[in-house]
Amino acid sequence: MATMAEGAPRATRFWQRMAIGLAVFIIFGFLQFALRGFVDPARAPWWVHLHGVAMLGWLGLLVAQPTLEARGNLDLHRRLGWVGAGLATAIVILGIYVGLASLVLHRFPPFFTPPYFLALTVVEALTFGLVVMAAIRKRRDTEWHRRLMIGATIVILEPALGRLLPMPLMIGWSDIPVGLIQLGVVGIIALHDRRTLGRVHPATKAIALLVIAVRITIYLAALAPPVIALASKLAGG
């Protein structure tokens, strides 16, 4: 694939740990929510389960890819990369569908207004897909590719955070703590950059700016009349 400017063994271990950390955090966020009785998985619609399976597949690939790279199995790494591209496309489609269907069936969290929930699901799903697409285009530049793949997953941390943070107490300003936590994860990558490259990589800066842009876009989109009208129509308001 790309040149290994960071030094293969040490850098690969870092990205492997980042992938595992994000996967464990996301799974824990959803699992503890269900175990505390806030949701009954058995009663969730099939499309919710399908979206969950797709996300588990993504997290599995996120962990598997740096592991394969560390073991020198770049051929399988590349082939699974194209599987990941298809999976990311499915996640975008399913993510938007779940958001729209949840509005229609009134399955969205009561502390979100319909326009905010619509903006949240659509903006995050589309951004995730665009960042994965950018990562694929940059697959021959390892340093960009790694950061963009992890960055795409950081963008969609909000659903897990929403199940861990006291969201009912953050109505109207939840984007601030969510964004700060996401930037904190990006900060871990920035520290790694400083240690290994002596500077913060441009891809890391781009992800940080993207996190901020996504939170602002969601907030502003939820106030836009067309979004309000569509959300009201979907929710039967």
Image (spheres, rainbow, N blue to C red):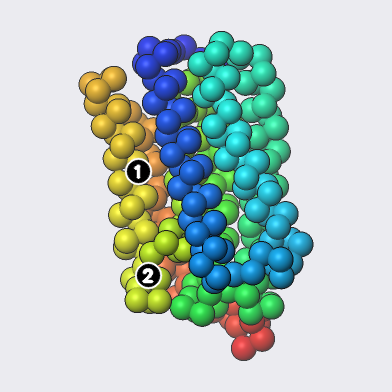
Q: Nearer the viewer, residue 214 or 188?
A: 188
Mark sitting earlier along the chain (2/1): 2
**Residue at image location 48% in from the left, 36% down from the top:** 20
In the rendered view, tell whether residue 201 sits above or below residue 156.
Answer: above
In the rendered view, tell whether residue 176 sits above or below residue 3.
Answer: below
Answer left or right for 117 relative to 191: right
Residue under circle 1? 185
Q: Nearer the viewer, residue 25 or 219?
A: 25
Q: Amino acid at mark 2?
A: Pro
Residue under circle 2? 166
Q: Residue furthest right?
A: 46
In the rendered view, tell whether residue 16 sits above or below residue 185.
Answer: above
CA–CA distance in space, label 2 to label 1: 20 Å
* Among the 4 quarters of the image, the one containing residue 76: top right
Q: Nearer the viewer, residue 126 or 44?
A: 44
Q: Secondary structure at mark 1?
A: helix
Residue 204: x, y in percent?
35, 35
Residue 213: x, y in percent?
39, 54
Q: Secondary structure at mark 2?
A: loop
Q: Could you tell me if residue 215 is visible in this image?
A: yes
**Residue at image location 62% in from the left, 45% down from the top:** 56
Q: Could you tell me if residue 230 is visible in this image?
A: no
Classify mark 2: residues with Cα within 10 Å, few (<14), some (14-19) or many (20+): few
Q: Disc 2 vs disc 1: which is toward the camera?
A: 2
* Among the 4 quarters of the image, the one containing residue 237: bottom right
Q: In what quadrant of the picture does the N terminus appear?
A: top right
Residue 178: x, y in percent?
37, 59
